Amino acid sequence: MALSSAFRERLEYMEHTKNQRLFLLQAEKELQANKSQVLESKLADIRSMEQRCFILDRNIAFQNFRILALKSEIQKLDTKYQADSHQLRVLKSEMEELGRVEKEKERFYELKHNEMTAFRKNVEDFVSESRKRVNELKNQVNELNSTFIELRGKNGYLSNSDIAAAEMRKSELLAVKENLDKSLASNYQIRSQLQMQLQSILSTQNQEKKPSQFPASKAGMK
């Protein structure tokens, strides 16, 4: 009896131990299952996060590509702006130089015009004075001729010295007249040449002004 009771207790103990172990195994199994579920959930979260990270990386790469493209476009625009600014400065410098040259030409033409006007007046004054002098010489020659004729009519003859003096005076007056005529002809020729030069200068000035006015009007239209 004692052996049976001990054996039974031993069996009960073993059964109890078995049940505890089974309970522990079941609890461990459930715990592992829960851990597996948690792990799978975490893995799913990780995969979702990885997917989001992949999408973010792709968006970042796309944004970086756009940034690089925009930087390249900005550099191109900056280069074009620098080139246009340089060209604008060159054009402004050329326009200023053209304006300066145009002003110098206008001052030069005005100076030449004033010189031509003064010279023309001097020539006209000289011509007028020369004509007056020629008329006076003509009157003196006529007086000499009249005196010569009058003397011959009164006396019938003249002394050789008187005739020689009168002829010499007449020759001197004729020589003076001839020199004045040559001087007048030369002055007329110079006057004509200067007038032609003045007309050529004014014509050149007008032709040069027309092209300079056209770009200005074209720039104004822009």
Image (tube, rainbow, N blue to C red):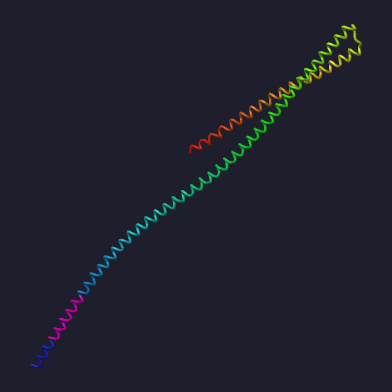
Q: How many marks?
A: 0
Residue 132, x across and y down, in percent: 76, 20
177 or 76, nearer to the observer: 177
Q: Quadrant of residue 44?
A: bottom left
Q: Quadrant of residue 152?
A: top right
Residue 13, x across and y down, in percent: 14, 86
Hey, which residue is sitting farthest left in the picture? 1
Image side of residue 25 versus residue 142, left or right: left
Q: Which residue is depicted at the point 90% across and 9% down? A: 158
Residue 148, x across and y down, in percent: 86, 11
Residue 23 lies within the magenta run: yes
Image side of residue 108 versus residue 51, left or right: right
Q: Which residue is depicted at the point 89% across and 7% down? A: 154
Residue 180, x across and y down, in percent: 78, 20
Q: Which residues are magenta?
A: 12-28
Q: Give the main secondary structure, helix, strand or loop, of the magenta stretch.
A: helix
Residue 205 lies within the magenta run: no
Q: Quadrant of the N terminus?
A: bottom left
Q: Is residue 178 above or below residue 220?
A: above
